[in-house]
Image (tube, rainbow, N blue to C red):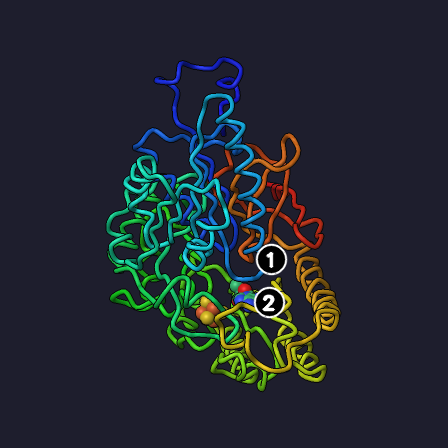
């Protein structure tokens, strides 16, 4: 949290801590990267600010996956430039840096189109931030760094500072799958797995600082091969004292090995929830997407997962209106959703990304058609999510308590199936797994109470 009192009682410039505001868009990888950027900048005296106003350094960590997210970067930079001008007029200064996948993909365009920007830094160069900031202070124009060196980055990043009960640990970055709609292979580069020893050392350090849940993240996390498979990594992490829960995201169906599926049945700490994007239920569309599996193969994986862990909850990503998608093919997606029954899901209208193969495919679907399909898909997914949440009513579930809830006396935690749970408790429960009785369900959360003690 920012110390607002500092605004009311300004300190002399020399002794004032430098303030860093990071605005994060996009996926978990960006959330993780923003934390790491904070770690890199802490030794320089930067403390976290919760708004750009008054910050000395603003980093916009951007997402390139869909057009809307990308366009937002330029409007946000326009607003930041105004703030920078205000600060300048008052005799102060503010450095603006653009990070993330838009920086990687459109760095030069940012330098041309966004006048207030001092620094453009791609996701593989965050370890160089102190040096880049110093360089940009001396430079006249925009400083740009977008080289690809993931090995170097991970080795050079400082130790993690944990905050909270659950922490992301990046195990893998980049993607070699080249789905025809997706920019990730171009912005994040080829698949790279961090060595298992480094991942486990980071996990141990986090557990020692009180983290109870580790979420292994990667663009293709189940393609992990850093000296062992992801299943091996999960088995090793489950042995670390203090690690009570393990999750991983995001997975590709073709990398769901039998070993990883079996792990869901064997490792108690591995939570019964899996985000497994399918994108479409039509085998023809999947082929055009270059997903390299068909709808039946996805259903077969789901069956195997449920055989290994009966109660596993599934989540997915869907794209509607992919070029050439016919109404009957969209209905195959609805049929797949009905066949699986998802606990939650993300669904998007196809967004044309210049430079990807699908951008030039014939049969681009009209926006109103895609919008209408998205509405139908989301109505079905919402109904499934609500039904899944409602199924929990009356059950006792272990909840990892991660902080206070919305009201005084209320606590917030997560069920094994990643549902948000609110219940009346107290702050001493934070960081512990507590069994609660589910009493209510809505689309986005569960209500619960502490179970009554059995009479002696
Ligand atoms: N248009 C719409 N959605 C996309 N995604 C990736 N690229 C696009 C695109 N061009 C979605 C996919 C992916 C998720 C992270 O974003 O569903 O799984
Ligand atoms: Fe993009 Fe496909 Fe790689 Fe996922 S697997 S990051 S959708 S190219």
Q: Secondary structure at mark 2?
A: loop
Asked if marks 1 and 2 touch (Cβ < 8 Å), the reply is yes
Tell me the crowding category of disc 1: few under 14, some 14 to 19, or many 20 or more residues within 10 angstroms, Cα based. few
Considering only order in the chain, which callout, 2 or 1, is on the residue closer to the N terminus? 1
The yes-or-no answer for disc 2 within 8 Å of ligand 1 is yes
Residue for badge 2: 351
Relative to residue 289, is residue 195 drawn left or right? left
Q: Is residue 262 above or below residue 332?
A: above
List x then y, in percent, for residue 323. Answer: 61, 78
Observer-nearest of 144 and 423: 144
Tell me the crowding category of disc 2: few under 14, some 14 to 19, or many 20 or more residues within 10 angstroms, Cα based. many
Q: Is residue 176 above or below residue 361?
A: above
Observer-nearest of 217 and 93: 93
List x then y, in percent, for residue 119. Answer: 39, 44
Ligand 1 lies in which image quarter?
Answer: bottom right
The reply to whether residue 42 is in sight is yes
List x then y, in percent, for residue 352. Answer: 58, 69
Residue for badge 1: 68
Relative to residue 35, is residue 327 drawn left or right? right
* Residue for point 40% across, 71% down: 260
* Residue for point 34% across, 68% down: 190
Relative to residue 160, is residue 335 drawn left or right? right
Q: Is residue 193 above or below residue 17?
A: below
Query: Spatial distance from mark 1 to mark 2, Cα to Cα?
Result: 8 Å
The reply to whether residue 273 is in sight is no
Relative to residue 440, is residue 140 drawn left or right? left
Q: Secondary structure at mark 1?
A: helix
């Amino acid at each position: 949290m920012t110390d607002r009192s500092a605004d009311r009682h300004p300190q002399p410039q020399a002794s004032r801590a430098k303030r860093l505001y990071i605005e994060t868009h996009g996926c978990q990888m960006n959330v993780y990267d923003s934390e790491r950027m904070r770690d890199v900048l802490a030794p320089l005296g930067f403390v976290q600010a919760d708004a750009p106003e008054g910050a000395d350094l603003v980093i916009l960590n951007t997402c390139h996956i869909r057009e809307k997210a990308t366009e937002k970067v330029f409007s946000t930079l326009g607003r930041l430039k105004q703030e920078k001008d205000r600060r300048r007029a008052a005799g102060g200064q503010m450095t603006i840096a653009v990070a993330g996948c838009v920086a990687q993909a459109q760095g030069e365009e940012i330098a041309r189109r966004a006048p207030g920007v001092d620094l453009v830094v791609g996701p593989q160069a965050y370890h160089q931030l102190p040096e880049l900031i110093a360089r940009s202070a001396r430079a006249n124009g925009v400083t740009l760094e977008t080289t690809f060196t993931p090995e170097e980055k991970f080795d050079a990043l400082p130790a993690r500072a944990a905050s909270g009960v659950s922490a992301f640990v990046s195990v893998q970055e980049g993607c070699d799958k080249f789905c025809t709609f997706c920019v990730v292979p171009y912005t994040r580069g080829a698949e790279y797995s961090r060595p298992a020893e480094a991942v486990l050392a980071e996990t141990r350090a986090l557990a020692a600082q009180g983290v109870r849940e580790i979420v292994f993240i990667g663009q293709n996390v189940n393609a992990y091969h850093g000296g062992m498979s992801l299943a091996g990594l999960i088995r090793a992490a489950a042995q670390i004292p203090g690690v009570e829960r393990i999750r991983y995201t995001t997975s590709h169906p073709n990398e769901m090995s039998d070993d990883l599926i079996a792990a869901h049945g064997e490792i108690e700490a591995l939570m019964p929830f899996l985000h497994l994007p399918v994108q479409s239920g039509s085998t023809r569309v999947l082929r055009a997407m270059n997903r390299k599996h068909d709808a039946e193969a996805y259903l077969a994986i789901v069956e195997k997962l449920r055989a290994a862990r009966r109660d596993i909850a599934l989540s997915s990503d869907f794209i509607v209106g992919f070029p050439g998608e016919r109404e009957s093919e969209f209905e195959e997606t609805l049929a797949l959703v009905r066949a699986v029954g998802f606990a939650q899901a993300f669904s998007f209208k196809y967004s044309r990304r210049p430079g990807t193969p699908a951008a030039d495919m014939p049969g681009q679907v009209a926006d109103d058609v895609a919008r209408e399909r998205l509405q139908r898909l989301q109505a079905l997914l919402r109904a499934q999510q609500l039904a899944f949440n409602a199924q929990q009513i009356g059950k006792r579930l272990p909840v990892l308590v991660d902080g206070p809830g919305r009201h005084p006396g209320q606590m917030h935690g997560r069920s094994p199936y990643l549902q948000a749970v609110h219940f009346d408790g107290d702050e001493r429960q934070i960081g512990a797994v507590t069994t609660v009785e589910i009493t209510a369900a809505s689309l986005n959360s569960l209500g619960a109470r502490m179970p009554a003690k059995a009479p002696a």
